[in-house]
Amino acid sequence: MMVLVFGLYYRRYRDKELVTAASLFNVFAFGVLTVLSSVEFSLAAGFGLFAILALFTLRSEQISKVEITYFFGSIAIAVICSIQGTELAFVGVIVTLVLLGAWALDHPRILQSADGVKITLDKIDSHALSDPEAMRTDLSKRLGVDVMSYQITALDYINDMARINVFFRKT
């Protein structure tokens, strides 16, 4: 997970929020599956777990990837603690490891120099797609930060607008 998320994905895309969410989700899922693999788990309970996870799509307000991940973490801890047939010491160790993993992976010193912002440009640059380096340089000048990478999420030629996720280095 560390190689995939930090070594490959983060080095290329610099999306701090998704890296944090993916790594924490991995830790939480690992904790739940570790406990589930130590006991007999019925098919009905598995469907119930998926029903709980489906509640994420029923939320009424927009929340960030990291907030969703912490929400999943709280559900994961509840599932870990509620499975009958596991020893209390084993559950305590797994919950402690999950919490320590979340603390370490979302620590402010990890990825501290990177941040991201969603912007809308009122004019589509002619080199938006054809010259990524020129676009990155232009975004750095406009925003006054060192843009590490960007993702164009929408181009609207009717209104001459571009929506872009910009990932930059904080100084």
Image (spheres, grey):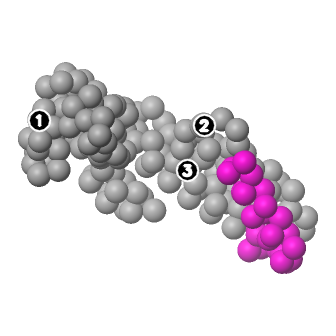
How far, Cα to Cα, is label 3 from label 2? 20 Å
Neighbours of disc 3 within 10 Å: few (<14), some (14-19), many (20+): many
Q: Position of residue 14 (x, y in %)?
A: 31, 45
Label 1 vs label 3, nearer the camera: 1
Q: Position of residue 160 (x, y in %)?
A: 25, 35
Q: Is the C-beta separation of discs 1 and 2 under 8 Å?
A: no
On-image quarter of the N terminus: bottom left
| Residue drawn 30% across the image and 35% down it | 159
If you read the primary sequence from the N terminus, does the residue marked by circle 1 or circle 2 appear first? 2
Does residue 157 appear in the picture of this structure? yes
Q: Nearer the viewer, residue 164 or 73?
A: 164
Q: Which mark is residue 62?
A: 2
If you read the primary sequence from the N terminus, does the residue marked by circle 1 or circle 3 appear first? 3
Q: What kind of residue is marked 2?
A: Gln
| Residue drawn 90% across the image and 68% down it | 85
Residue 109 occupies quadrant: top left
Q: Which residue is mark 1?
A: 137
If you read the primary sequence from the N terminus, does the residue marked by circle 3 or circle 2 appear first? 3
**Residue 40 included in the magenta stretch of the image:** yes
Dominant secondary-structure state across the stretch colored magenta: helix
Q: What kind of residue is marked 1?
A: Thr
Does residue 14 appear in the picture of this structure? no
Q: Which residue is mark 3?
A: 24
- Name the outermost residue toward the right: 84
| Residue drawn 34% across the image and 31% down it | 119
